[in-house]
Amino acid sequence: MIEIRRVRSEDAGRLARFFETLEARGVGRLFHPHPLSAESARQLAAYAGKDLYFILLETDDVLGYGMLRGWDEGYDIPSLGMAIHPDAQGQGLGRLLMSFLHVAALRRGASTVRLRVAPINTAAARLYRSLGYELTPEKDGPYLVGLLPLRGPRRQRDR
C-alpha cells in the first residue's frame, strides 16, 4: 500500500536510511536541498514550522521524499524539491509525488511553485516539463529554474 504523509517523529530512522541510500547511489550530487544525513532526518522528523516535508511510503519503506519550503523565510512562492528511491524510479512515483506537492501548495495558499534542477538531470527535467514547468537557465548559477502556476481554488491553511 502506498501512502504520502508529512514526516513524523517516528519517521527519523526510515528517512535516515532513505537519505543514506540516496547518498550511496550518487543522488546527492543532483539533489542536495540539505545534507542527506541521519541528523537532517532527525531534524525533519521533529520539525514544526510552516514549510512542508512529506514521505512517500510503501509499507515501512520510504520510496520518495518531497518538500515545499520557503514559507518560514516569508516567501510567497515555495520551493519544491523531491527525490524518488533509485530502485523505484520509472514507476510513476515521481509524477504522483509532484502532483501531491502541487495540491499541498495550492491548499496552503500558493499560486505558484518554484524548483531548480541540474541540466544533467535529464529525467527530472523531462518530468518537470511534462507537468508544465518552463525551465530557464538560472541567472547566476548552474541550474535550470522552473515556475509552475497552480490552478484551482486556493485556501490558506497553517496546519
Image (tube, helix red, strand yellow):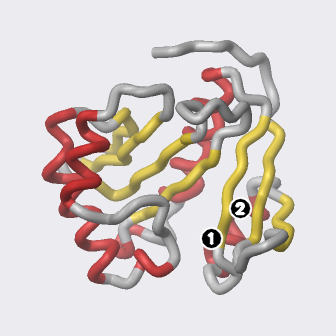
Q: Dot 2: few (<14), some (14–19), or many (≥20) neighbours within 10 Å?
A: many
Q: Residues within 10 Å of mark 1 (few under 14, many from 20)?
A: some
Circle 1: element type: helix
13 sits to left or right of 124: left
Relative depth, front residue between 57 and 49: 49
> What is the three-letter code of the residue carrying label 1?
Ala
Snapshot quadrant of residue 136: bottom right
On the image, the x and y values in percent for residue 137 come to: 83, 73
Residue drawn at x 81%, y 54% as measured from the top left:
132
In the rendered image, which quarter contains the C terminus?
A: top left
Q: Which residue type does callout 2 highlight?
A: Tyr
Residue 140: quadrant of the picture? bottom right
Asked if residue 59 lies left or right of residue 122, the reply is left
- Callouts 1 and 2 close, C-beta under 8 Å: yes
Task: Give percent across and percent down for residue 125.
Answer: 70, 71
Dot label at residue 128:
2
- Give me the residue at 19% from left, 59% from top: 38
Mark 2 secondary-structure assignment: helix
Residue at point 80%, 69% (across, down): 138
Q: Residue at point 79% right, 47% down? A: 148
Tell whether 34 sits left or right of 117: left
Left or right: residue 159 versus residue 61 is right
Residue 144 higher or lower than 49, as above or below: below
Classify residue 149 by image quadrant.
top right
If the image is split into quadrants, where does the N terminus sit? top left
Given residues 110 and 60, the one toward you in this image is 110
Q: Which mark is residue 124?
A: 1
State how far apart marks 1 and 2 are (Cα): 6 Å
Where does the image place residue 31, in percent across and percent down from the top left?
Answer: 49, 69
